[in-house]
Structure formats: structure tokens, C-alpha cells
Image (cartoon, helix red, strand yellow):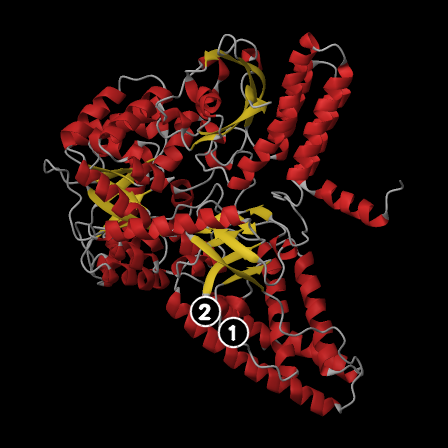
Amino acid sequence: MAESASQRAEREVGRRRPGFRLLEEIGTIVTESSDFGASLQGIVRSVARHMSMEVCSIYVYDPARRLLTLMATAGLDPSSVGRITMSVDEGLTGIVVEKLQPVMAIDALTHPRYKYFPETGEERYHSFLGVPVVDRGQPVGVLILQTSRRRRFTTSEVRLLRAIAVPISSILAQTQLQANLATKEEERLTYQRRMDDAIRRLEGYRSTPEAHSHDGGQVRLLGVPAAPGYGIGRAHLIKPDVSFSGLPRQRTGSVKSELARIEAAKKRSARELDRTKERIVATVPEIDATMFDAQRMMLEDPSFEARIEAAIREGLSAEAALEEAVEGLSRHFTELDDAYFKDRAADIKDIGQRLLRHLLGVREKTRQFVSSVVLVGADIALSDLSLVEQEGLRGVVLARGGGTSHASILARSLEIPTVAGAEHADTVIREGDHIIVDGNAGLVYVNPTPEIVKEYDRLTKEYRAFNRDLETLRLLPAETPDGHHVALCANIGLLGDLHLANLHGAEAIGLYRTEIAFLSHRDFLAEEEQVELYHRIVTRMEGKPVTIRTLDVGADKYPRYLNAPQEDNPFLGWRSIRVSLELTEVFKAQLRAILRVSAAGPVRLMFPMISGVEEIRRAKELLAEARDELTMAGQPFDPNLPVGIMIEVPSAVQLADQLVKEVDFVSIGTNDLIQYVLAVDRNNRKVGSMYEPLHPAVIQALAVVVRAARRAGKQVAICGEMASDPMCALLLVGLGLDNLSMSSFFIPIIKRLIRAVPYGVAQDLAKQVLTFSTVAEIKSHVFTVMRDLNLIDLIEMYH
């Protein structure tokens, strides 16, 4: 019977679904290859590629000998195929056969059943998902996924992997059939029946990491975590309130009347800009107030006015004249090879929308979100920032931008989960779509399956319950049962972060990242601007110490106005203290600002990325000059301002004994130190899995710095992400760190850990770990200690 048009359309829709594409590809691999090993190898490559997994492997089960043998892999060392065998009583893979159910581990290396085979190279991979491959109710193998990132596999991923196991089971069954059955026809029919069953079970399923459009099905988008937390709501697309499309082109009124309309629209627009500026600046002072002034100046720019007037005199309506002026200027700015002027193109379009709205008599919408809403757009323009302050807003999704965009800064300050850089979000997502925003992982789920919704509901409830339990610890000291105190401090970058720091019981600000304000401005902050901002930080901490780090720009975070060089390897180039020591006037302005606010409360000054004694001495020379200049000007400051450095590069570790003599305290910046010690860029997907905080070389480096600080009688802190990971924090306490500084969210979790573990136990743990030579040994030992102390729930909450 001929295929109908509707059947063809339905088939084509099916083909566009990744699950179907994967199954079809597997079917093609099987039918076109007579080589059993080649088929399995083709399948694991296909699964890894389609599901964006770093490892996919197939183990074959021999029931007679109760052995599992690695028969195909994409991601592990290919030479281990056929060589790795294990009893069904061993490893996580064996549990899959024993239970005949999917087995998941967020961090397989710490699981008591984890079996390590050095020849595979799988110690880099943490998360594990294995599903049984079953034929006629009996296990014939195991299909496995692994990722370097600790993560939970979604219900949809588990379901898809189980579906994939169906045709794989037929392949494994074929090997037995080749030995025991007389004809290949029965093999083909067996395979076909299983494939048909799999396709029927998967009908309607969709999960699309790389989707560019959707038809109401499920879509998953990957972006950049910009503000943490989970948000669930209905999509509200950020679109212009008005459009030039369809408006009359020719002028019907007089030139005078059209010009009067333009002038009235300009006045109303200027008043709106002033009101928005006052509101935003009061909320987030880090956002550059001059961007409002820049729009105001462009609004009143004589050349902009001249373009509009000329077009009106030529016979165009006020609206058409405005459109021509906006398009002309925008095109001109875009063509200029300068980031500043490209920003002006966006400004002029925003001004055009504002003026057009007033020409048409459309009021500025004060959209009140009465229910749960997720804002979605390519980016949020200046005129849309007020939307981020709405009561019913649950999340923000941006197709462009990153963690330092104005929208991201405002959302983070207001504790609104945000994902930026979610490519195609503005075209894939439709008004009213059901959205989950995972601001921790940078994931966006569009019309998620009930299983995913249930999982995020569970995470949200667990988070709330966990916080309720931890709230009782807020006013209690971070002190071990045997009386050892560890200061728990907050890392901040925004004034709004202080609310969370105080809410979660931070004893101090261990790291204030001053560069966030610089990154959001259009020029270096003037000394007075810095004084005003830092003063607000210090006074709001009400006597608690604030450690202010000098400008740490470069690598992946250059301000647009800084004439940065094009570098092949910016992480090893012109960045951090190197920039400051070259731009001495900018640096001294910041040093004077920090010194001046030291008169308002306890402040500590910290220099980033010091690599040698020469650098810290030069920085101190400039600090002395700044002190002298303030003394000459009669400006008060703390003459005993504590000065410290960040240990972030291997040379600083090697010179720790010399460097600690130059300063009052040291702080270890593990985010960079781990990258430099292991020669791993954690943002590079090819090697990101090798970024390992619990690597023996990293632990040894930390121990070197702690011992040097102890010998010199100086305090030593840590302010990288290691401090917030319970498995790492327990070890850090044992190593002798005085101060752990982290995102405020994790302070209660680490406080509970410290209050539950005697200092002697932590010290013994650190001594033992310093004798280990592999990551697996370290993780297994730390995990065992935490399990014995009933602290496993802290690991689960962190991950």
C-alpha cells in the first residue's frame, strides 16, 4: 500500500527526533556490518555523539563463567577492549547485572563497589549510568555512560538508554544465534521485532540538546550559569512593545507638527530614562550608571535630531523619519571595528523603540507577573531591566551574554536563577512554554517531561528542607567538637551579595572581586566611584572584616575599554597583577580608594596572582606611594592595613617561604592554582575532565603553602571552589587552613561539616591523604571517612 502524505509527514517528524535518529543510525550500523566487533564499536560512538557523553561502553556477559568483558568503548583507552574482565560480583557494572535495573552513581570513584582498572583511564570520569542489556529476560550485557562532571542522569536519559539497549540486545543475541541457530533469517526477524518494539515504545519522545526549533516537544538548551538556583514557570518572551512595520511612511501633517511630536516624545523618553536610572542604581550600584546618561545624550544628540528633521522635511512621517535615523546610525556604528561603538548600535535601537512608543501614545508597560514567569530573550535591553525586578519572576534565559552582562548582574543580586548564552533560546522557546531554569548547571528545559519536573520539584523541596535544618546553625560558630575554630567567609562581587553573606552567617568577606564593577562599566572606575562603592560594602558588614582584591582582569574577562592584546594563550598572558603593575595610575587610584575606605571599618588588601618576590615588592612600592599621596592630601586611612597575596601559580607555591615574609596573610586561589598545577583548562571540554581538585599534586601544593605560613606565623586562607565542596573542605580543615571563603550558599553546609568532625579526625585524614599517589585512593578514603561520620548527605547536596 502506498504511503499517505500524513504517514510521510509523521515519519519525517519522527526522523527529526534525536531518539529516532539514534535508533535509525544504530539500525543502519547493524544491518550494514557483518562484523560483530565493528557493529558494537559503531554503536558506542553513535550513542556518545548523539547523547553528548564523554564515555559509552558495552560489556558482554558470559552467564556460564559469570564474567563481564569490555567489548566496545568510545572514550576509554581502546586498547583495553577485550582485556578488561570482571566478575559479576565486582564493580558497579556487576550491580547492573545483579539487579537487572539501571544503576546510577553521581561520583562512581567514591562508591564502595567501584573497581578501578588503570588501563582504561576511567579515573577521570565521575558520573556513571549503566543499564542492563537483556534478551528473553536474561542478561547478555551492560550498556554504560560516563561523564567527567558529577551529575545526575535525567529520567529521559535513562529511558533513552534502556531503549537503545533493546537493539543492542538483539546484536548480542545474534552472536549466540550464529552458534546455535540454523538460519540467519530467524536472526533478522528477531532483530526486526525488537527494533519495532523499541520504536513503538519511543513514539512521541524527544530530548534535544542541540535543537534550533521545536514543535511543542521537549527541548534541552545548554548555556552559562549566570545566577544560581532553580526556577520553574511559563515563558514570557521579551519583545518590543511597538514596531515600525506597517506604519504610514508619508507625512500627512505639517513639518512643524511632526517635529513637535518628536520633541514631545523625546521629553517623555528622557523622564523615563531618569526614573529607570534612579531605580536600577539604587538596587545594583555595580551597573554602570553612565549607560543611562549615554542614552540620554544620544537622545538629545544634534546629529540624531538633524537626521530626523531632514527626513521629515523630505516628506516622511515622524515615525518613518525616526526609523530611517535609527537604522542609519545603527548601521554606521555596527560597521565600526570597535566594541564601544557596537554597543552604541544597541543603544540607538533601544532609544528608537522608546521614542516610537511615545509617538504612538503607548504607555511603558509595568508588567506585573501574577504567576510564575521565566523571561526569555536574545538579551535584555536597558529598557527591559525593570522587568527583572518583578515579583512573579522565577528565572531568566538569555540567548546571548554571560555572567557579567547587566541582566545577569541584576538577576544575581535579586537571587533570580539565570542562564545566559543559551544559544537559540529566543527562537526555540515560545510564549507560554513550560520552562525549568537550572542556574547551577546552566541548563534550560523547555516543556520538560513529567519525570524531569518531578526531579526538579524534589531538588527544590530538598533544598528548602535542607536550608531549614541548616538555619539553626547560622549564629553558631564553625567549631569542631574538640574546640578548633575555622573562619567561614563569603566570596562576593556585588553589593547585593551582602544580603546572602549575612543571611548564611558569614564571619567576614574573604574575597571581594572588584573587577565585576569594572567589567560592567564603559571605562575604568574613577577613584571617587570606587570609594563610594567600597564604602557601602564595608559599612554594610557592620564591623566584620572585608578582604578587597585588587583588579583581576584578563584571560577570559577583559573590560571592553581595555586595549587588550590578542594572545594565543591569554591565561598565561597579560592578566591580573600584570595589568595593574603596567597601568600604574589606574592601579594607584584603586589602592587609594581601598586605603580610604579602611578608615570606615576593618579592611584587608589582597593582590592577585603574585608569581614572585619582585611583583609583590613592586606592588607594595605603589601602595606606599598611594599612602604618601593620601597623607599629603589629609585623607584618613588605616596605617596598619593588612596586606596579603593570592597563591595561584606554581612559582608562588615554590617560593611560599619567601613570599609569606613579605605580607601579613596569604590566600590560596584554587580555581587557578589547579589549572596551572595540572596544566588543564577547565573550560576546555577535551581536557576539562582532568581538572581535579583532589589530585595528589594539588593537595601537596596546598600543604606546602600551609607549612610555609605556619613557619612564618601568618594566617592562610583558601578562596576557591574547593572550599565549598564538603569532600575537599574536610581535607582542608585537616591540612590546617585558618579560613575557608566560598559562595554564601555553601557556608551552612560546610559549617555543619566542621561542627560534626573532630579536628583530630580531620588531621589524621590529611596525614593519610598526603601519602596517597592517586585521585581514586584519595576520594575513596575521604568518602569512607565521611560515610562513617554520617555526612554523605552533604556530598549529595553539594553536587
Instruction: Using the image, determine if residue 524 lies above or below residue 195.
Output: below
For the residue carrying disc 1, how many other residues have a C-alpha within 10 Å: few (<14), some (14-19), or many (20+)? few
Q: Which residue is mark 1?
A: 367
SS of the residue under disc 1: loop
Look at label 2 and name its amino acid. Gln
| Residue located 15% across and 47% down the image | 477
In this view, 459 is above or below 543: above
Density class for disc 2 (Cα within 10 Å; few <14, some 14-19, many ≥20) is some
Which of 788/89 is in front? Answer: 89
Looking at the picture, which amino acid does disc 1 mark? Arg
Query: Is residue 73 visible to us here?
Result: yes
Residue 12: x percent and y percent?
77, 44
- Residue 96 lies, with reference to residue 725, above or below; the image says above
Query: In the picture, residue 599 is in which quadrant?
Result: bottom left
Q: What separation in Å lies between label 1 and label 2 (alpha carbons)?
A: 8 Å
Q: Find residue 470 and report its horizontal and vertical position in percent.
A: 24, 49
Query: Which quadrant holds residue 150?
Result: top left
Are the two marked residues, 1 and 2, in contact with CB atoms closer than 8 angstroms?
A: yes
User: Considering only order in the chain, which callout, 2 or 1, is on the residue closer to the N terminus?
Assistant: 1
Percent coordinates x, y for residue 45 in the rendering: 63, 25
Circle 2 is placed at which residue position? 390
